Amino acid sequence: MKQDQVKDYYGQTLQGSSDLKTDACCTEAAPPLHIRKALGAVHDDVSARYYGCGIVIPSELDGLKVLDLGSGAGRDVFALAKLVGPNGSVTGVDMTAEQLEIARSHEQWHAEQFGYDKPNTRFLEGYLEKLEELDLEPESFDLIISNCVINLCTDKPAVFKAAHKLLKPGGELYFSDVYADRRVPQELINDPILYGECLSGALYWNDFQSMAKQAGFIDPRIAEHRPLAILHPQIQEMLNPIKFASVTARLIKLEGLDTSCEDYGQAVIYKGGAQGMERIFDLDVEHQIEAGRVFPVCRNTLKMLTDTRFAKFFDVIGKGETHFGPFPGCAAVDVFGPTASEKIPTSSASAPVGGCC
Ligand SMILES: C[S@@+](CC[C@H](N)C(=O)[O-])C[C@H]1O[C@@H](n2cnc3c(N)ncnc32)[C@H](O)[C@@H]1O
């Protein structure tokens, strides 16, 4: 069974990030200082077992209730436990007992480091395809994260649907994963190393878009993306000519979103001050909003900024009573092409060998 094979890979085969056959652990973007500090506060034994592919920590986390799907040894859970503060909480779910054991054995240590009376973390053993069987209340989470895990899931639509149910309105699924520029052939999916290393289970990008929308996330946004270079000759040969990209997506749960970007003549002014984005608010790769500037937005973007925890940072211009047609300048992002963001290195010389676990 695929899940037993993956469990074995993360429970027995890999003992740390350096054991990855494709040298795939490749988070490269430099996050804001407060996130770097939180990641730096995580115990070394936990960090050594990090198999993620992106930074899954958005801004403004104080007091939030967070869920991590496929939390592994807990690196992101503990960093978030510091950032949400003692009034917030972070729950990790994973199916691999060995990973959970490491995470659980470090809960008290992190609580003490952060100066909390008791841990604000908990770890549950279970399958992401069966989240409804776990002690997780519907519409109770402000933020759901996941780091290089959904590609390993056998029923990906079920995971997106369950995440949508578990989020509060205005909450978001903010997650990193690997995607392919076409549907990966079954013989490659059957290869345990290509699958375990987060390559051959990757969703075709267009299938991901449809799946997210079907789950209720009508307007998926891209927070970061970068192409993956497969430099390992044997693996490159096996996968050629499929292109892979690591993408951090932002799926915000909102009612009444348009299926395309529509112009209602509205704009926002960012007041500044969101944590780590004091002068430029970074919603996604297409929306970097400078403080103090009138910034025209489509109706969906307006909702993402004002029907969410970010509302207090924005003034709105325009009542939105008249529809002026499609919002100008809305185009699909090519996640397999060079990244637009200056934060992300593009050199294939510095890129890792394989996918991004
Ligand atoms: C690539 S690792 C990433 C772990 C962690 N997110 C990190 O960044 O270090 C994948 C993790 O997902 C877990 N996993 C994979 N498929 C799963 C599933 N269907 N249900 C629950 N956990 C799963 C594995 O046990 C493993 O710990």
Image (cartoon, helix red, strand yellow):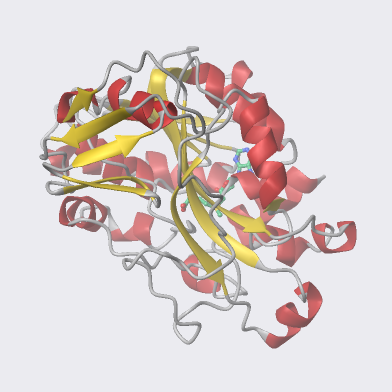
Q: Position of residue 51 (x, y in %)?
A: 49, 59
Residue drawn at point x = 52 percent, y = 37 percent: 220
Q: Position of residue 47 (x, y in %)?
A: 36, 59
Q: Is 63 placed above or below 70 here?
A: above
Q: Which quadrant of the view contains residue 178?
A: bottom right
Q: Is 14 placed above or below 230 here?
A: above
Left or right of 82 on screen, residue 19: right
Q: In the image shown, does 203 or 137 lie closer to the viewer?
A: 203
Q: Position of residue 8 (x, y in %)?
A: 68, 53
Q: Is residue 117 visible?
A: yes
Q: Which quadrant of the rendered structure holds the C terminus? A: bottom right
Please tell me how many numbered marks the rendered image carries: 0
Q: In the image shown, does 289 or 330 lie closer to the viewer?
A: 330
Q: Which quadrant of the view contains residue 232?
A: bottom right
Q: Is 347 placed above or below 61 here?
A: below
Q: In the image shown, does 312 or 102 lie closer to the viewer?
A: 312
Residue drawn at point x = 45 percent, y = 26 percent: 324
Residue drawn at point x = 22 percent, y = 24 percent: 316
Q: Which quadrant of the rendered structure holds the N terminus? A: top right
Q: Is residue 61 visible?
A: no
Q: Which quadrant of the view contains residue 59?
A: top left
